[in-house]
Image (cartoon, helix red, strand yellow):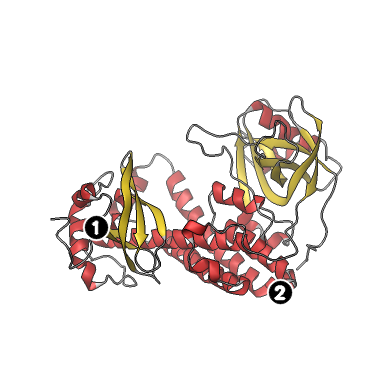
Amino acid sequence: MGITPFNYARQNIRLPLLVDIQKDDGQLLYDVPLPNAHLPPELTTASLYELNLVVPLHRSVIQDAISSNKLSDSCSYGHVVYKPANSDGLVGSVGCASEILIGAPSAAQNAEDRNLARDRDDSGPLLVLARGSFRFRVKEIVNSMPYPVAIVDEILDETIIRGDSDTNKEDDDAVDSLSSKDLVKSIFQSLDKLLKANAEASAAPLTPLEKSILENAPSSAPMAQAIRRRFDAEERIAVFQTFTSSLLDLAPAESDRIFAVAMMAGELANLPSDVRLKMLVTTDGVARLRLVLRELSSMLSMDLARKITKSLSLGGGGNNDSIELDPRSLKAAEESQKQLQVGIPKLPKWADQIKKGVRVEYFWNEDEGWCLGTVNEDPIRIMDEIIVTVKFDDDGSIHKLPFRGDDKARWRPPTGNTGAFD
């Protein structure tokens, strides 16, 4: 297994830049890549991503990257995801270089067509299969029309491990007190649970409704997608196992391991673009670990909530032996079961009575369980959900938490308590 050193930074690299744009909902148009140049190719199979480029200017960026590197084994472009505040230009912007593995018109149907398409000008949509390489900061813009071409330098993490740049004093929690070794251990444990849960979900037998949809589908596309999800889940587990067993060889230094673990967790857990952006911008490796662990914990909590909700909707008859509801929550669980309906889940009736000063309980995660707190300010309603600010009794921390119909099993009135929700 090849090893790529961490201790030098690429400098003065020419890259055509793909400057991401936001969709109407505020999300970035394309997935944010993460660095993978420090890993051997066999550990990057879960890190490949597709871009279906329909914007003509973005197609030109990829075509430039391909045509400029015809004599090279690889061709890359720069994906800019962060622009400094109060900056009119792109100098100082942060992004991730991406290696183009396949660049072909979306209409190309087979491998031969796609390979030929690398040298063919195409005015239609362009499908790109790429892999993140290294993060960079724009040093100089050498050409701005019709798209920016830049000279960039690679960004490396700080050599001094601090871990305090991501700490929010209003949201201090147990994660802030963990050492880098404990953070890595917790990330591995959380990632293992998450990957196994995803594999279990992808391998679960189809429900009668799903079978009916597949049987009446005009093509095999839905089945193909289900098979692909199952293969992807198994592939991610295999990559994770190989990565953990070879980590010391891949990254002998602690700072390198911190970087590698966070980036690998980001890829395997398929973290959202806003989290990936923060991972790219920070140069504090321990702060990045904390960011990743919080996100993994949130994903695990949501997965548990979905399992609880599914168990309730099945009347407790589902295959959900690993979920044990606290006897104190049975009354709230029965009430939640009555509220479950076909279509978009609705908030329970008692949610309308939530206001400042009301006591509530919230299921934080498997370790913390049900946490008692007080609503710190009147909720904010956004469409079919409310944002509830809760001050928890145990540590006095204050958190803004969404209360939606699809995760109402995580909320309940205080058990055996007041008549506030009568």
Which quarter shows the C terminus?
bottom left
- Quarter of the image with the N terminus in it: bottom right
Which one is closest to the eye, mark 1 or mark 2? Answer: 2
Label 2 sits on residue: 248
Q: Mark 1 vs mark 2: which is more N-terminal? A: 2
In the image, residue 251 sits, relative to residue 78, either above or below, namely below
Give neighbour class at mark 2: few <14, some 14-19, many 20+ (Cα, 10 Å).
Answer: few
**Which residue: 39% across, 66% down?**
365
Q: Is residue 292 left or right of residue 332?
A: right
Question: Compared to 67, does 316 lie above or below?
Answer: below
Residue 168, placed above or below residue 417: above
Judging depth in this view, the residue of 2 and 226 nearest the camera is 2
The reply to whether discs 1 and 2 touch (Cβ–Cβ < 8 Å) is: no
Percent of width and height locating residue 105: 65, 33
**In the rendered image, is residue 310 in sight?**
no
Disc marking residue 313: 1
Looking at the picture, which amino acid does disc 2 mark?
Leu
Residue 93's spot in the image, x, y percent? 71, 41
Q: Amino acid at mark 1?
A: Ser
- What is the distance, in whole Å, between disc 1 and disc 2 at their CAs? 45 Å
> From the viewer's perspective, is 145 left or right of 355?
right
